[in-house]
Image: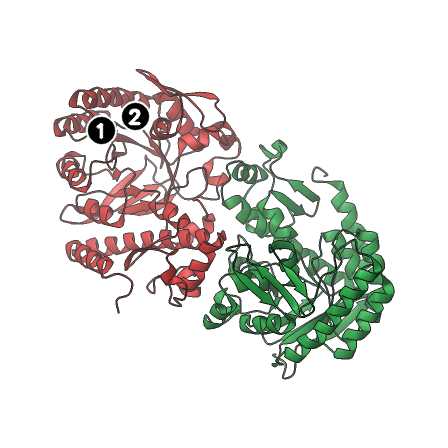
Chain colours: A green, B red
């Protein structure tokens, strides 16, 4: 049922720091921990919306940077919003655009008020500020709007990190002021502060004082390594409001997700399963392997016997190898579908383990199976 | 029901020269006139087998040339045949490989016994003869095997055409001798003779004397133009055995198909709907249009309101335009699906018109609607 107030998250059970919960939104309910497939420009690459739904995915991510350039936020609004345009009536989270501006756009210029940049597509000039990013996400009809911030580069000095974080916190307040509350919609603030825990703590305090429907941890998975990422999560997550969902942006591998759920994270997004699907890398119950490898040319086994996707139930590894060798579009189509199915099944397994109070054993078993490889009995 | 004898075609009704019929094969029944989507290398490009089936397609085509090079005919046989490899339990027709050798392979050398050529993929040397082509199609488990012939180039002199046709007829006899009859399987001979009607007549007589489960008309749609193609069909088709299916190879546009059905053709294949789907060209009830055109950027109508495919029922022209502008794979995926759906609906309309004895009126109405264009009321 759609909430009368803002988007709301409710806790169902815990297992250590890990949390099983439910997100109630204007566009339907989502069980957490959840993995969001990335639908960059209004499409999860190489998949129909039906195929995405069939994997069990209930929440997808859209990229404000890509959508504001093409087809344009006003055009998306005229077409009835991103849900209608992309045939995704379920909830959608949009990022703020800031991260892609810094990684994709040429000639970007940051100032205290926002960032001016040129489009990587046609060179046209654009500007994003806290207010503009929030307004664009409203035009896209994002169920969850992200605060516009600066993802502090890694490595950065403590001083650089402090200045960047302080600016992001000022921007967070402006984003909140610009956000138009609607029943079942929400806005998330983003914790910055790099690897400096006192800065992370100050960022958490600043965001909690503003008050958001959820809190993201940003500026991680940018090269600091898994041990550092976990250390930051262990110190940061316990300080976050307990009644709001926690989102670790841009993470990650199945192993990263296992470790982060165990540290209290509820939401994830990453291009890994979709990008890997286009480059012949398969995520499976037996680990990761590259289907271009010649050893698969005559392998008449299903890719992942435990998987219910069309690739695994109807085709052999040999056929998938053949499709990638011939650069047939069906290769990326089937493998992306499988990888998203794998990630959704993987998250379902995590949720069941939390419910049963055996996440640690589940994680250990998963890691052991990945390491056995695909030629094990 | 699968026939006890060879693949069989039965006439259900006629309308002028047009025929409504039914092809009974080891892999299921097919209503004719039928259009076969082209599944070049074991996949109808950009579509899952499920999607192809959902359009009503019941018979697809595979290319011997592509499959013998990758993944290799022996490998396809080891993987259980093309049906199993490609998740297509329905009937499959394979061509003989000859046409693609002449159009794709470098360093091809034709002799009286066959053709030696290098692979366009890796330069490796291969050979096709009537016996080898027939054996390869057996390894692929083709429901319908095509005779190995030379598609006489256009233009060609009468002498060149005579020699080429005579060689193809000698090869046809060798193909028939090499073919292993199996219940519900069949082999088609191919009429050659270019635009010279006496040569066409002699070719028909030669093939009928050998005896095949079906007869193809080859060497058309190679640049001779629609009036010449129709003239050849008008003189050739009435001479073909009336109790066997007739297949016009490589044809064509919806208009070509209408005219050829009216001249007694039962089967068609062409890359037009799939290739067009990858290049933003849409085949619709209102004619053909290019979705890259800027006029579609804000067009919130369905591509073809009469179509039941996922593109037409769930998305706008503006979204499809956006996908092609961003080179998102979903653009080719959805438009190929639509184009194949359109072709299948179009064939269904033709079959209903023949049954009702009003093919001429149906064809006139189709042509009028195509010309009205997509902005008509």
Residue sitting farthest toward the bottom: A4
Q: Secondary structure at mark 2?
A: loop
Where residue A226 appears, as percent x and y from the top left, is 80, 52
Q: Quadrant of the C terminus of chain A?
A: top right
Residue A19's place in the image compared with A292, above or below, is below
Residue sitting farthest toward the top: B112
Q: Which residue is mark 2?
A: B149
Residue A286 as seen in the image, left or right of residue B244: right
What number is the disc on residue A252?
Answer: none
Where residue A40 appears, as percent x and y from the top left, is 57, 58
Where residue B360 appears, as percent x and y from the top left, is 15, 54
Q: Please identify the quarter of the rendering in which residue B63 is found.
A: top left
User: Is residue A355 at all visible to an observer of this figure?
Assistant: no
**Could you classify mark 1 by the number of other residues whose Cα lies within 10 Å: few (under 14), some (14-19), or many (20 or more)?**
many
Q: Which residue is mark 1?
A: B192
Q: Share a chain, discs 2 and 1?
A: yes
**Marked residue chain, label 2:** B
Q: Quadrant of the N terminus of chain A?
A: bottom right
Tell me if label 2 and label 1 are in contact, CB under 8 Å.
yes
Residue for point 80% across, 68% down: A14
Residue B42 as seen in the image, left or right of residue A54: left
Residue for point 63% across, 43% down: A281
Question: For this rendering, which residue is in front, A297 or A141?
Answer: A141
Q: Please identify the quarter of the rendering in which residue B150 is found.
A: top left
**Could you classify mark 2 by the number of other residues whose Cα lies within 10 Å: few (under 14), some (14-19), or many (20 or more)?**
many
Residue B233's place in the image compared with B122, above or below, is below
User: Is residue A102 at all visible to an observer of this figure?
Assistant: yes
**Marked residue chain, label 1:** B
């Amino acid at each position: 049922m759609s909430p009368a107030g803002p988007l709301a998250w409710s806790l169902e059970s815990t297992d250590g720091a890990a949390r099983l919960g439910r997100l109630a939104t204007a566009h339907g309910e989502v069980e957490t921990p959840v993995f969001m497939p990335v639908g960059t420009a209004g499409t999860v690459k190489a998949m129909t919306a039906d195929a995405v739904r069939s994997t069990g995915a209930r929440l997808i991510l859209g990229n404000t940077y890509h959508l504001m350039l093409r087809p344009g936020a006003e055009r998306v609004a005229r077409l009835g919003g991103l849900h209608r345009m992309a045939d995704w009536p379920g909830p959608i989270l949009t990022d703020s655009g800031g991260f892609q501006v810094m990684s994709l756009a040429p000639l970007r210029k940051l100032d205290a008020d926002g960032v001016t940049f040129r489009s990587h597509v046609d060179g046209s000039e654009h500007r994003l500020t806290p207010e503009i990013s929030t307004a664009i996400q409203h035009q896209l009809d994002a169920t969850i709007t992200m605060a516009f911030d600066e993802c502090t580069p890694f490595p950065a000095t403590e001083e650089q990190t402090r200045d960047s974080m302080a600016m992001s916190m000022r921007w967070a307040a402006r984003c909140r002021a610009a956000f138009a509350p609607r029943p079942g919609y929400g806005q998330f603030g983003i914790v910055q502060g790099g690897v400096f825990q006192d800065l992370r703590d100050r960022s958490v305090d600043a965001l909690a004082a503003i008050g958001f429907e959820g809190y993201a941890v940003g500026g991680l998975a940018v090269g600091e390594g898994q041990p550092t990422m976990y250390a930051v999560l262990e110190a940061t997550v316990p300080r976050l409001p307990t009644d709001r969902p926690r989102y670790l942006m841009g993470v990650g591998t199945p192993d990263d997700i296992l470790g982060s759920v165990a540290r209290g994270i509820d939401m994830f997004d990453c291009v890994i399963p979709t990008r890997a699907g286009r480059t012949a890398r398969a995520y499976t119950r037996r680990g990761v392997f590259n289907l271009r490898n010649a050893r698969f040319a005559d392998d008449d086994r299903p890719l992942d016997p435990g998987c219910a996707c069309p690739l695994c139930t109807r085709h052999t590894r040999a056929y998938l190898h053949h499709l990638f060798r011939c650069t047939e579009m069906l290769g990326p189509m089937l493998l992306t579908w499988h990888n998203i199915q794998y990630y959704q099944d993987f998250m379902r397994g995590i949720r069941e383990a939390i419910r049963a109070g055996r996440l640690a054993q589940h994680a250990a078993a998963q890691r052991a199976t990945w390491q056995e490889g695909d030629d094990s009995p």
